[in-house]
Image (cartoon, coloured by chain):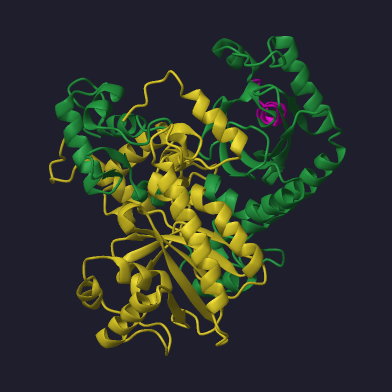
Chain colours: A yellow, B green
Amino acid sequence: MARQSNGVSAISRVVQILDTFSFEAPFLSLSEISERAGIPMSSAHRIVSELVEHGLLERMPDRSYRVGNRLWEMGSRTPGALGLREIALPYLHAIQSRVRQHTQLLVRSGLDILVIERLSSRDAVVNASIVGGRTPMQLSSSGIVFLATTEDDLVPALLERGLAPLTPTSLRTEAELRAAVERCRRDGYAVSSGWIFEESRGVAVPVRGSQEVTVGALSVVIPNDGSPVDDLVRLLRVAADGISDALLRSYLPPGHPHARPGGVYRQLVSSSQASMEYFEHLLEGHSSGA
Amino acid sequence: MARQSNGVSAISRVVQILDTFSFEAPFLSLSEISERAGIPMSSAHRIVSELVEHGLLERMPDRSYRVGNRLWEMGSRTPGALGLREIALPYLHAIQSRVRQHTQLLVRSGLDILVIERLSSRDAVVNASIVGGRTPMQLSSSGIVFLATTEDDLVPALLERGLAPLTPTSLRTEAELRAAVERCRRDGYAVSSGWIFEESRGVAVPVRGSQEVTVGALSVVIPNDGSPVDDLVRLLRVAADGISDALLRSYLPPGHPHARPGGVYRQLVSSSQASMEYFEHLLEGHSSGA
C-alpha cells in the first residue's frame, strides 16, 4: 500500500478510524473521530468521506457518523464468527429454552474472548456480555476453557498484562489462575463464580473442531447461588458435541455420506433441510472456488 | 487517501479485495483474490498481507484466506444492523416459537434487501435467505414493504436493472410491481406467493423508526398453500410495534421516564434487565461521547 509521509499506511488509518467506534460511542462527530484516532482533521475528513462513499461508515442526519451496514455485511462472510454462530444457533436455542438465563458462544481473540452470540431473557442474572464485545480471558469461564485447551502457555502474557480482578473472588495470582486451568483440564469444563459480578456465575465447555482444536466455547451465565452444575454441564456437553459434529460435517467434501447438505454454503449457513438441499443444488455445475 | 497511479485509492482496493469473498467462496487463494478483484498479484499480495496483519483477513493452514473475525468484530458496532437485530431478537423468537417456519429481520440496501437475522427450524419450507445475504426488492415481500413505505419511487430503477423473475408467479411487469406496492400501502403488509420458490410464501410488515421512517421489515417464510394470513399479520404487527417502541425508547436521553435502561448501550445491546441497569451505571461519570 502507498505509505503516508509519516510511514502509516492507508489501511492502518482506516483501521484506526473504524476502531474509534465502540459500544460506548456508536455515533461520533468528525472531530471526535480525528481526536480518538490521532489523525489530523484534514486527513480524517478525506478518509471518512471515502469510507462513507463505500458505505463502511454512514452519515447521520445530525452530521455524526456510525459504522455502516456495509461493513457488517462484509463481516458476515466470516466462517470463524458468523459461520460458527449459524451452525451453533439451534443448539444455543435448545440450551436457552431449558436454562432461561444467558446462553453464549465465544471465540478466542488474542488474550481476550469475543462474544459471537448471546441469548438472554428479561429476568436473567446480570451479565456484561455484548455481541461483538471482548472479555479478558482470566475473568471468564470461557477464557479458562481456551487456556486449558490451547497448546501455548498464555499465562505469562496474561500476568504481564495484569489480572485486573473485579470482585473478591476474581483470580488474583498466578497460582490461582494455573489452578483454575488445571481444574478445567481435569474436569473438561470451567466455572467462574462471581469473577465479574458477585451475583453471577459462568459455566463453560469447549467446542472442538478438526484435530480436537478448540474453536469455540459454549457457556451459560447463571445465578451465583452455589447450586450444583452437573446437569448443566451435561446439557452443555451434549450441545458442544452436536456443534462439533455439525462443524466437522460442514467441511466434508460434497457427496461424502456424512456431509451436511448445502454444498459450500454449509460452512456459513444453517437453514432448514429443504433450504440446504436447495443451496447444494444451486452449486451443481458451478466450479467450487477454493 | 493516497491514490495509486491508476487513480484507484487504497480504500477502493481494500473494498474490492474484501468483496471477493462471498457465501459461495468463503475461502480463496491469493491468485483467486487477485483474479476476482482485478488487481495484479504483486499489489494483491501487499494488500492481503497488510489485511492479515490487522486481522481483517485470516490465513488458513492450506494457505487460503478467509474474512477475519476482526472484521466481524468491527461490523458488530453497527446500530443499523446488529443494533436493530439485538433489539428485535426477543420479538423474532416470540414469532418463531409460534410459527415454527423462518422468521426474518431485513433492512434495505440500495435496490436490495439485506438479511440481518433469520431463525429457522429443521422442517421449515425452502428459503434462500442467508444472514448477510441480499435479495432483489421485487422478489421479496420485505422488498415490497420498503417500496411501499419509501418516499422515492424506486420502481424505475428496478425496471432498469430488470425484474428477473424466477417462477411463473414472480412479478414480471411494471403494472404488476406497482399493483403489489399499492396493495401493501393499502393493507399495511405484503405477501409474496411463490416469487422465489413455488413452495414458499413471504409475509412482511414494516418496522418503523422515528418520524415513521421504515427502518426494517419483519417477515415470515411459510408454505405457499393459500391458507389465510390474517392471524400471522396480526402477530407480525404486534412484534413490529414492540420493536418500534423499543427502538424509539433506545434513543431517548438517559433519565427520560420512557427511556430503556442501559445508557448509550441501549442502541446496541438488549440483554436482561439487570444487565442493562449495569450498563447504565457503567457510564455514570463518563462523558457520553456524541
**Among all residues in the image, which is located at the extreme front?**
A257
Image x and y of residue A265, in percent: 46, 35
- Magenta span contains residue B82: no
- Magenta span contains residue B146: yes
**Among all residues in the image, which is located at the extreme bottom?**
A168
What secondary structure is the magenta-colored segment mainly?
Answer: helix
Image x and y of residue A21, in percent: 41, 53
- Does the image show residue B248? no
> Eyeballing the image, is B175 above or below A259?
above
Quick one: A149 or A77, which is closer to the camera?
Answer: A149
Quarter holding residue B26: top left
Left or right: B273 in relation to A22? right
> Eyeballing the image, is B147 above or below A183?
above
Region in magenta: B143-153
Residue at 68% x, 27% y is B151
> Eyeballing the image, is B205 above or below B74?
above
Residue at 49% x, 40% y is A260
- Does the image show residue B231? yes
Left or right: B157 in relation to B142? left
